[in-house]
Image (cartoon, rainbow, N blue to C red):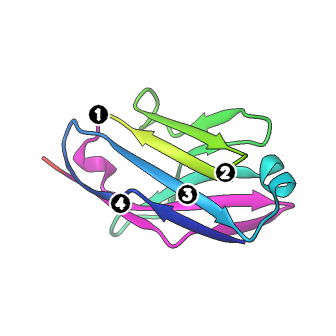
Amino acid sequence: VQLQASGGGLVQAGGSLRLSCVAQRTILSSFSVADMGWYRQAPGKQRELVAIIHGNGNTNYADSVKGRFTISRNSAKKTVSLQMNSLNPDDTAVYYCYMLRDGTPYWGQGTQVTVSS
């Protein structure tokens, strides 16, 4: 499995970005039941969960992003997206796409999100 993330960049506070991640080298049925999510890691901090969408469609969000971020998936395209609104400087981090399939975690290469004040 390879996870290819895109969509990061530089945005002013209050702005929006949309991250996308496509799962390659995995069959559709396997992707459909996998948990997909996004983690982030800011400089000097531990990697933390941002949002996750389970195979059954249920979602979980970090308290800090609830109401601002929305995670979604398109199983036909084997993609997971993260719509980020009302961004603030505390959201600045490298964002990593994540997949959990059959108990095995997979990580994307990370995409930088920088929010200027």
Question: Which amino acid lies under the numbered mark 3 shown in the image of this protein?
Answer: Cys
For marks 3 and 4 on the same chain, the one whose residue lies earlier in the sequence: 3
Specify whether 42 is left or right of 96. left
Q: Quadrant of residue 31?
A: bottom right
Task: Give the SS element for disc 1.
Answer: loop
Task: Give the SS element for disc 4.
Answer: strand
Specify whether 25 is left or right of 116. right
Residue 49 image point, x, y percent: 55, 51
Task: Measure the C-alpha gap from mark 4 to mark 2.
Answer: 26 Å
- Which residue was labeled with disc 2? 77
Task: Give the SS element for disc 3.
Answer: strand
| Magenta residue span | 86-115
In the figure, 114 relative to 3: above or below? above
- Which residue was labeled with disc 1? 86
- Which residue was labeled with disc 4? 93
Which circle marks residue 22 in the picture? Answer: none
Residue 65 image point, x, y percent: 43, 37
Question: Which amino acid lies under the numbered mark 2 shown in the image of this protein?
Answer: Lys
For marks 1 and 2 on the same chain, the one whose residue lies earlier in the sequence: 2
Is disc 3 in contact with disc 1, using a CB cutoff of under 8 Å? no
- Which residue was labeled with disc 3? 21
For marks 1 and 4 on the same chain, the one whose residue lies earlier in the sequence: 1
Is disc 2 in contact with disc 3, using a CB cutoff of under 8 Å? no
Q: Quadrant of the N terminus?
A: bottom right
For marks 3 and 1 on the same chain, the one whose residue lies earlier in the sequence: 3
* Discs 1/2, front: 2
* Discs 1/4, front: 1
Residue 50 image point, x, y percent: 51, 47
* Discs 4/2, front: 2
Mark 4 crowd level (few <14, some 14–19, many ≥20, 10 Å Cα): many
